[in-house]
Amino acid sequence: MMHKPRHLLILPRLRIQNANAISAPLTWGFPAMTALTGFMQALERRLPDELYLQLEQIGVVSHGHEIQSSPVGYNEQQFHLTRNPINNRKYLEKDGGTKVPAIVEEGRMHMDISLMLAVGGGDGTGDDLAGQNLQKNAEELTQIARDIDVIVHGMRIAGGSVMPRADIERRPRLVSLPDDSEDYDREFQKIRRQLLPGFALVLNEQALAERLAACRHTDPDTSPLDAWLDFARLHHDCLIDEEDGTHAWQIRRRSGWQVPIPVGYKSLSAHEPGTVANARDPHIPFHFVESIYSIGQWVSPHRLPRPESLLWYVDNDLDNGIYRLNNDYIRHNH
């Protein structure tokens, strides 16, 4: 569990074009939170040194999305794929053909999102930052937020390009939250109202545990993967009336909009620096990894009691080779 954020950077209504819609080998439809965390780390490196800001946590609210795909047959979708030009002559045939596949398979989507980032200082607590950079008047804080927003619009988010805002009334903000608990909650209520309408992505691993227990009640051999895949299905249950023998079909309903998502990586094998050919950086250890999956939930921002319910943070277990993200939505909503 991360400490309570003292300062928040709100980047509202970012229009992302051609973001990566394939979040992991088994999931698609919205970028993984690991991609947004990577954006947060890249943004921190681009900030001016005199600001001395640390971006520690990130949350996302989706206001709209458009998958670049078309329906094919019954209940199937096919991504819009492009034929990329071949620049290297060694891949060209004499008759004009190529030695590589004509189509590079990739999934793209356009989306309209808002990001909220927890901002800290040099010691990780935010105390020194509060005394240096964020104890300024509203105009200075607004200017810092706008300067950061300019940097964001020159970057990529989940592989997509950041387009100019259509809603010019909603500007980026840098907010310092008060110490008093009531004032803290009141200030966040104002912030979350500005994120409407939309849906926030949070973590709900409890739903997976409950589904696994329910499945094992009828089938003791049910694995966690079976329970996880259950969230990707649309179930039709047959209800039989024992009195007259009639039956009816209905769709099984769940409490909440729950979806399978990737949350990080598990190391399969570790190798010393320079021992793996073609590694990106030969000076650091190399790991072969596989994706870690869990269950996410889309909730309306007005149902989030505190910023910690929305924000995701790094929660690695280096001894066991686990590199993953976590979120405290269940902790603050139960």
Image (cartoon, helix red, strand yellow):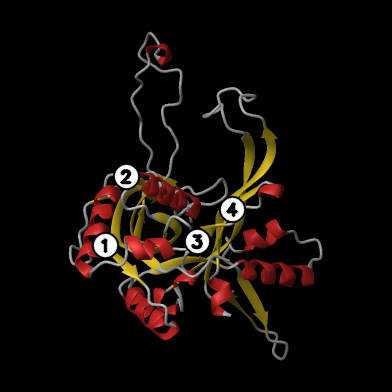
Q: Is residue 253 visible?
A: no
Label 2 SS: loop
Q: Mark 1 or mark 4: which comes first in sequence? A: 1
Q: Among all residues in the image, which is located at the extreme right? A: 220
Label 4 SS: strand
How far apart, in angstroms, are the residues tagged by discs 1 and 3? Answer: 20 Å
Q: Mark 3 or mark 4: which comes first in sequence? A: 3
Q: Which residue is more in the foreground, 149 or 142?
A: 142
The type of residue carrying mark 4 is Arg
Residue 172 is labelled as: 1
Label 3 SS: strand
Q: Is residue 88 above or below residue 273?
A: above
Residue 198 is situated, as x and y percent measured from the top left of the image, at: 36, 69
**Which corner quadrant holds the C terminus?**
bottom right
The type of residue carrying mark 1 is Pro
Residue 218 is situated, as x and y percent measured from the top left of the image, at: 78, 71
- Seen at 22% across and 63% down, the residue is 140
Residue 155 is labelled as: 2
Q: Mark 2 or mark 4: which comes first in sequence? A: 2
The type of residue carrying mark 2 is Met
Q: Which residue is more in the foreground, 98 or 1?
A: 1
**Which corner quadrant holds the N terminus?**
bottom right
Whether the residues at callouts 1 and 4 have beta carbons within 8 Å, the answer is no
